[in-house]
Amino acid sequence: MTSTITPHTASPCFQLKGSMITMMTLELYRFDELNLHHQLQGLVAKAPRFFENTPVVVGLENLHDPEGPIDLPRLCSLCAGFGINLIAIRGGNADHRTSASDAGLACLPAQPASAARKVPSATHSFDSNPASSVTPLKKENVTPIHQNESGLNNTVSPEPSDARKDEPAPESPVYQTPKIISSPIRSGQQVFHDGDLILTGPVSTGAEVLVTGNLYAYGAFRGRALVGVKGNGQARIFCTHFEAELVSIHGHYKMAAAMDKSLWKQAVQVYLQDDSLALKQLT
Amino acid sequence: MARIIVVTSGKGGVGKTTTSAALSTGLALQGHRTVVIDFDIGLRNLDLVMGCERRVVYDFINIINGEAALHQALIKDKHTDNLFVLPASQTRDKDALTPEGVAQVLETLSKEFDYIVCDSPAGIERGALMALYHADEAIITTNPEVSSVRDSDRILGILHSKSRRAELNLEPVREHLLLTRYDPTRVERGDMLSVEDVTDILAIPLLGVIPEDDTVLKASNQGMPVIHLEDSDAGNAYDDAVQRFLGQECPMRFLEAPRKGLLQRIFGGQG
């Protein structure tokens, strides 16, 4: 997939090396934005950390309509909304490559047909979209990826800006950078943010954090966390050090006294399941 | 330009005035020209602790209202060179503190002094807000118990949102935690929050730990800042805190309960 160029000049500052990197490939069958969004959402819901800090290549060899236009900047922002970092396209025609360079993606040569066939068919499947009639094997718009060998050993670097959007409100697929607050939130302070919020400092007892999207708290969280406050039942709360006085999603709330004490000071996520709050330890 | 230091806590009775007296005396003893201002208008206390209550003629409010000149109201401390006290008024209330007046007084003092220590009243109302508004540094005086910690946390939030530095988007106020009335024996018994418990909640650097000490009360009643007493643990701890404030490395003391001697352990029974 990469070539080797190694310049040998006097005392070089660097060396170019070809290396084989196992990379996730998102094989696109057709670019149907709405379905794509829907299916990505399903995928990310099943495995929220699946794409975290993982570069992804879009494979265009198996497009149902190889000449059809694909709005790659749009695809990029759609994927970014789920925390999927597209870095390149593979294959595709000249128009696709132009669109890719507009989106800031690199262009890789198409994979030879023999290699492409090794796609494990059992990686994933979605039930949301009925089979398309063209190729019976390929049921979906997207098959998430062949992960060859040790492909997914994410070396997670805690880059806050990479924070993924877990389940954004369906009507806003556009990637919104989450807001990051690193100073402590003190007793009596109230923080509101429209969108996702990342807190790297502590939140004290008596402080209140309200967000319309998801809340990620990396410091000790001792205040009140209210997410999905404008009616997003999909919003979640993630705390690495959970001591919240109160958690609330979309109006459903739970006080500390009603919470399982074994979760105290643990890494915890809170989400809405069948109209009741589920608090689960993150392992 | 002087550094303006506010000694504040939210909660009352935790040792703000004692700390203001000790800190300003400590700074002056190190050769810094220092003035300590009592912002507790209506409940004048600082002059008692500083032992200058009989020499109060004019006060802070007189200056704000233009009824006296600044040098008429400043009381030179009789124990320490370089130290002046600006007392509060006992006959007025905190509404007499106007933002313009306070700003003007502080600006004038800034030109003459190295440090201005503002002794904040309890609460989060006008007096406390006026005391902290101009601060460059804040000494958050906290007792190791939950309500004091909660109130300190609240006042830290106010420093972040309502101080001059916050409003003008300048470099934030430097915050220092001063834990007072610390009793290691009670901490070991689990009756009292430990240093770690408090720093974990407040998440600001620790300036010092002042042990619970009978000499504090005695010193206050005598009008002698406790830092003058050489055989007082609290006085020594304040001394250390001043050194740290001035950037000296200084190990924390008085964090361990005094160990019982061998005989006491043998004959001390359950005690």
Image: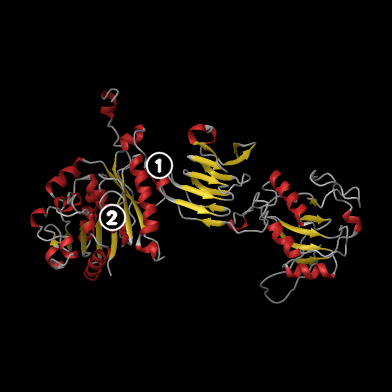
- On the question of residue A282 being in view, the answer is no
- From mark 2 to mark 1, how far is it between C-alphas? 30 Å
Q: Residue at x 50, y 56 (%)?
A: A181
**Residue A226: which disc?**
none
Which residue was labeled with disc 1? B197
> Could you say where residue B259 lies in the image, as x and y percent from the top left?
30, 35
What amino acid is labelled 2 in the image?
Answer: Arg
Which residue was labeled with disc 2? B126
Q: Quadrant of the N terminus of chain B?
A: bottom left
Q: Chain of mark 1?
A: B
Labelled pair 2, 1 in contact (Cβ < 8 Å): no
Q: Residue at x 48, y 43 (%)?
A: A224
Relative placement, left or right, of A271 versus A75 is: left
> Could you say where residue B155 lies in the image, as x and y percent from the top left?
35, 51
Circle 2 crowding by C-alpha within 10 Å: few under 14, some 14–19, many from 20: some
> Could you say where residue A63 lies in the image, as x and y percent from the top left?
86, 58
Q: Residue at x 33, y 48 (%)?
A: B252
N-terminal label among 2 and 1: 2
- Is B53 drawn above or below residue A222 in the view shown? below
Q: Nearer the viewer, residue A113 or B206?
A: A113
Q: Nearer the observer, disc 2 or disc 1?
A: 2
- Is B237 drawn above or below residue A13 in the view shown? above
Residue B80, by quadrant, is: bottom left
> Could you say where residue B226 lies in the image, as x and y percent from the top left?
19, 49
Relative placement, left or right, of A97 versus B33 is: right
What amino acid is labelled 1 in the image?
Answer: Asp
Relative placement, left or right, of A156 versus B125 is: right
Q: Residue at x 30, y 23 (%)?
A: B270
Q: Residue furthest left?
A: B54
Q: Quadrant of the C terminus of chain B?
A: top left
